[in-house]
Every structure is written in structure tokens, then in C-alpha cells.
């Protein structure tokens, strides 16, 4: 059975490749901000938005790729119920890091699998991350070291790189923090016969 990752995320693709999964990549065309607007208006939380976006991405690609299993994934950053999106530039990344400094936030990672335009399986997992209290000079040093990558993730950090130095405590699954709850996904793929063992 063909397996497609409906994402352009290099991190998610690397996680699947490292696990020995054979798949193709076809990023979805979903307008994420457009899809989020009515959810936010109806008071949906960051965790519910992560699930809705993961489902929409999987359904979008699945509708164009009949008889393939399509993986959709999304992650939201939640600071006391407020959802952060990817910063557009270094100034926004600096602002987000300043707001996260010294506080605990949650990352909600959702993964879904769709076939022929219908969601067959979904999973949501969350992790808690506590950032050190950061002086402005430390934030500036991090931004200079991380470069353009700060615009690739909500919060402006990647824990798989130098962003790990920003934290004093992390509680949760490593794969969830990277944006793909991998172990439950692999278990589902085994049940479908996509993985032999």
C-alpha cells in the first residue's frame, strides 16, 4: 500500500525515514490560517486546532491520491490557552521567546491517517516545556546562532538544535515535541500491514 506524508516538514520526513518507513511526500494545499479562523471564533483550543489541521491536511492529499494511506500532522504551541504560530521574522521570534521566557508552555502534536478522503485514525499527544528565564542578550545570541530557522517553528526554537539550551525542564515524548507522535503512528501502520514488523 502506498504511503504519503502530507507535509513539507523535513523533521517529520526524517523521523519516518529513520524508522525505516517507505513513503512519498506531497505537501497539502490547505489554507491553515483560513481553516483556523472559524475554529478560533468558536473558542476551540490549541489542541483541537492541531487535530483539525492534521485531519484537513490528510484529507486534502487523500482526495487527490486514491487508495493511498495519507499521513497528516500538525503541532500547536499553547501558552495558557493562547496559540502561537510560526514567527514571520526575527522580530516576531524575539517577541515570542520573550513571552515564553521563564514560563511553561505545551506543544500539542496531532497525527491522522486518511484514505480516499476519509480519516481512518487520529492521535493527539502533548508535552510540557519550561523555558529558562532569558535575559535579552541571551535571546539575541540564540537568534543570531539559529539564523533563519527561527521562522520554521512556533516559539522560534527547535529543541533538536541549539534551541534545547533555552529550556530548564521538558516533560513528554521526544517525537511529540518534534511534531510527530511516531510510536502510535508506527503501531497503526503495523495494524494496516504497511510495516511488516
Image (tube, helix red, strand yellow):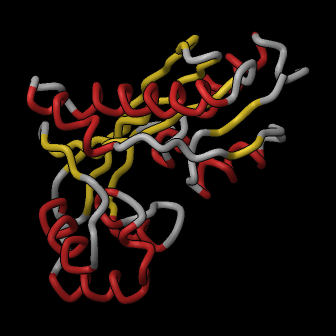
Q: Give the residue furthest to the front.
A: 64
Q: Residue 133 placed where, x, y %?
A: 18, 68
7 or 167: which is nearer to us?
7
Q: Residue 159 placed where, x, y %?
A: 46, 61
Specify the quadrant that holds the N terminus: top right
Left or right? Give the position of 18 relative to 158.
right
Q: Residue 10 placed where, x, y %?
A: 61, 58
Left or right? Give the position of 59 relative to 30.
right
Which residue sits at x=54%, y=13%? 118
Please state the total of marks drawn on the protein image: 0
Which quadrant of the figure has residue 37?
Answer: top left
Q: Residue 17 placed where, x, y %?
A: 77, 47
- Residue 194, compared with residue 152, is above or below; it is above
Which residue sits at x=27%, y=66%? 87
40 or 77: which is nearer to us?
40
Left or right? Give the position of 189 relative to 27.
right
Which quadrant of the figure has residue 38?
Answer: top left
Which residue sits at x=44%, y=73%? 149
Which quadrant of the figure has residue 48?
Answer: top left
151 or 190: which is nearer to us?
151
- Residue 164, compared with residue 59, is above or below; it is below
Left or right? Give the position of 61 relative to 35.
right
Specify the quadrant that holds the C terminus: top right
Amino acid at each position: 500500500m502506498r504511503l504519503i506524508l502530507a507535509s513539507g516538514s523535513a523533521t517529520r520526513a526524517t523521523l519516518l525515514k529513520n524508522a525505516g518507513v517507505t513513503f512519498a511526500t506531497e505537501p497539502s494545499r490547505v489554507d491553515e490560517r483560513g481553516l483556523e479562523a472559524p475554529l478560533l471564533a468558536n473558542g476551540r483550543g490549541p489542541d483541537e486546532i492541531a487535530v483539525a489541521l492534521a485531519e484537513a491536511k490528510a484529507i486534502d492529499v487523500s482526495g487527490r491520491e486514491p487508495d493511498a494511506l495519507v499521513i497528516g500532522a500538525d503541532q500547536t504551541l499553547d501558552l495558557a490557552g493562547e496559540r502561537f504560530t510560526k514567527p514571520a521574522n526575527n522580530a516576531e521570534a524575539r517577541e515570542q521567546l520573550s513571552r515564553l521566557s521563564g514560563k511553561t508552555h505545551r506543544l500539542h502534536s496531532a497525527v491522522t491517517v486518511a484514505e480516499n478522503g476519509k480519516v481512518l485514525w487520529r492521535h493527539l499527544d502533548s508535552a510540557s516545556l519550561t523555558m529558562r528565564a532569558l535575559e535579552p542578550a541571551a535571546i539575541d545570541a540564540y537568534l543570531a546562532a539559529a539564523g533563519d530557522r527561527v521562522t520554521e517553528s512556533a516559539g522560534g526554537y527547535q529543541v533538536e538544535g541549539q534551541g534545547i539550551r533555552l529550556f530548564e525542564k521538558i516533560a513528554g515524548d521526544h517525537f511529540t515535541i518534534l511534531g510527530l507522535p511516531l510510536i502510535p503512528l508506527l503501531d497503526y501502520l503495523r495494524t494496516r500491514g504497511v510495516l511488516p514488523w
